[in-house]
Amino acid sequence: MPSSNPAFSRGFPAAGSQSGSWGAGPQQTYGGAPAQYDPYSAPTPYAATDRAYMTMDDVVTKTGISFLVTVVSAAVTWAVLPESLAWGLALPAVLVAFVLGLVISFKQIANPVATLAYGVLYGIALGAISEAFNDIYPGIVMQALIGTFGVFAGMLVVYKTGAIRVTPKLTRWVVGAAVGALVLLLVNFLVGMFTTGDPLNLRDGGPVAIGFSLLMIGIAAFMLLLDFDAADEAIRRGVAPKFAWYIAFGLLVTVIWLYIEILRLLSYFRE
């Protein structure tokens, strides 16, 4: 599973930050009242300057580059590397990407090298995983890609139209659900080390496993809302353009998680 999403550690989103500020520069608090919490009040290397601030074009460009690098890495792993070598590289790549992802998340590193390195590493793992699944269930990778794109586009529409507003309460619920699901997976893994099979039936393809995968997909979908709101909030506060690499990293983490869960769910139905 991808490493911890930056929404767990970043200072935003704040309540009420919605699409009205997309592409806009720094804005003052309405009515002149001081903000209750300002994650950019402390000195930061990503603070706004008089010359440039992050725009939505920066976010779209950096995110597109990150996704492209990840897809190319996965495609090369699948098409070029022997399957045995791909699997041999997959586990080390995931472990290194996990550690790198934690460092990026908690230190809020906005650096193209860090974000693209994460994409390359997880691309290697995704290439090996996708090839294995497609060998067993022909065509499942394309179905998973379509499903992932559909969820991404749907949640973007939901966010842009304001059908679901990202509030502090919603953020707490989503983050709490994600942490709870990850703890449950960890418990299942630790118990499984001393027993046989899948002790909590979370990944055995049965009704419980299907329900759990649907839950994980739902959480990942709502995490996309937090990522969209994080980009909107950063633009409104006028951070430096390079911070778009951190936003791109957050979206990459969520989309990888979403793809893996959809791929797993489809395999259950194929069985």
Image (tube, rainbow, N blue to C red):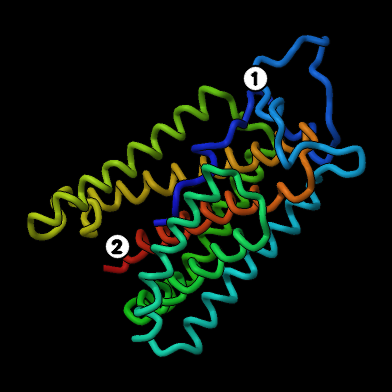
Q: Name the residue at 66% across, 15% down.
A: 36
Q: Is residue 212 left or right of residue 143?
A: left
Residue at left offset 60%, top offset 44%: 108
Q: Which of 226 and 117 is in front in this view?
A: 117
In the rendering, at what x and y percent does residue 226 appear? 58, 38
Residue at horizontal 73%, vertical 41%? 46
Q: Earlier in the sequence, mark 1 or mark 2?
A: 1
Residue 252 place in picture, x, y as percent: 57, 56
Q: Is residue 20 above or below residue 263?
A: above
Q: Which residue is labeled 1 in the image?
A: 37
In the displayed structure, 191 sits above or below 146; it is: above
Name the side, left or right, on which 185 lies relative to 164: left
Q: Which residue is drawn at 81% across and 45% down?
A: 55
Q: Toward which corner of the image does residue 178 lie, by quadrant?
A: top left
- Of the numbered discs in the image, which one, if any, rests on residue 268? 2
Crowdedness near tag 2: few (<14), some (14–19) or many (≥20) residues, C-alpha within 10 Å: some
The image position of residue 171, as x and y in percent, is 52, 30
Which type of secondary structure does the marked residue at label 1 adopt? loop
Alpha carbon separation for disc pair 1 and 2:
45 Å
Residue 38 occupies quadrant: top right
Amino acid type at circle 1 is Tyr
Q: Which of 254 and 234 lies nearest the eye of the viewer?
A: 234
